[in-house]
Amino acid sequence: MEESLSQLIDKFYTLKERYDASRQTKISKIISNKELSNREKRLKVTKMDKVPCVGCRRAVGSVFSVTRNGAARTFIAKCGDASSPCPLDIQFIVADRINYARAIAGGQSDINDIKTRIIIGKNNMLFDYSPDANATEWFSDLSEQLEETAQATGKIVESNIMINDNPENIAELETFKKYFVDEVLWGYNNMIEKYKQDVAVGETSSDNVPKTLAQYYIDDIAMWARDINNLEYPEMFVEHHNNRYILIQQQNPETNYFFNASDDKIITNTEGARPKPKSRTLSAAKKTPKNTTLKASK
Ligand SMILES: [Zn+2]
């Protein structure tokens, strides 16, 4: 099964946490060794043997990096052995998530800013406060900027409306609500009226509520009310605050309030094979730091 981006992010951080933890354990062991001086501890940490790679378990370490480029972050997890790396190779790009409301407010503020600059420039030209030979060029530059900003903001507004205030969804909800009032509730009220009339003319008694009435409530009214509520608030959950339970109803899932600044991309997703470490490699790895530290501390 192909992993989704969020699963990949989880995997990246799970591996990184495991790696950092084993590195931290190694460092703690050196730091807490009371027989070493501070200088020896420092040297031992700097010359410390690499932590096993999360892919191949060889003592070559792993590389975990998150770098920002523009509106995205690149995640890389790979083997620490640059010359003959194991297959561990996870690389993906996560775009920035931008909040619609903030982006629209920002766009509108930019538009107002450019408009103000155009007005000030025009006044300066009209009243000759600051004669500018490049006035025409400058003016067309600003006009172009204004058009571009207005267009970009317009697109964000449009996409926000389609996702968060989709006219079709709203129309559908209205249709259901109307049907609920005009047909479902009307039918129920009619049945009650008929029942009251029957009681009045003595055809039934008031303690003999027809089963159909109760059943109609369960089958139709309650079901319709629930469906309409679900349609109106796709996100409903209960939060517990200060011994109180609060029902949160959101018209849209949280993720709908954000859009991607660029495209997410999974470049590679290969986890390293994990051969059992050869005993020879292990003993060699254990000897190396001891010797170096002895030499270094002399
Ligand atoms: Zn490796």
Image (tube, rainbow, N blue to C red):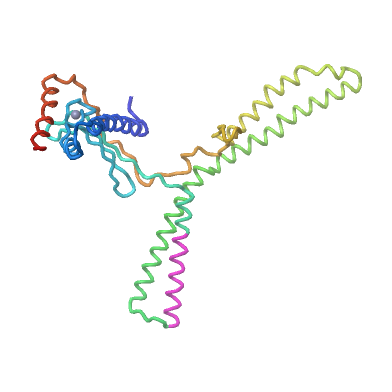
Residue furthest out toward the bottom: 128
Position of residue 43 relative to residue 187, above or below, is: below
Hey, which quadrant is residue 202 in on the image?
Answer: top right
Residue 298 drawn at (x, y percent) = 8, 37
User: Which residue is depicted at the point 47% across and 51% down?
Assistant: 102
Give the main secondary structure of the magenta stretch: helix
Q: Is residue 182 left or right of residue 161?
A: right
Residue 100 drawn at (x, y percent) = 47, 48
Position of residue 117 relative to residue 181, above or below, is: below
Q: Is residue 161 left or right of residue 125?
A: right
Hey, which quadrant is residue 123 in on the image?
Answer: bottom left
- Quadrant, the N terminus: top left
Q: Nearer the viewer, residue 252 or 28?
A: 28
Q: Is residue 116 magenta?
A: yes
User: Which residue is depicted at the point 69% across and 27% down?
Assistant: 221
Position of residue 115 relative to residue 105, above or below, is: below
Q: Nearer the viewer, residue 122 or 236?
A: 236
Residue 248 drawn at (x, y percent) = 57, 36
Residue 12 drawn at (x, y percent) = 31, 33
Q: Is residue 82 left or right of residue 258?
A: left
Q: Which residues are magenta?
A: 109-127
Q: Is residue 148 magenta?
A: no
| Ligand 1's quadrant | top left
Hey, which quadrant is residue 153 in on the image?
Answer: bottom left
**How many marks overall?**
0
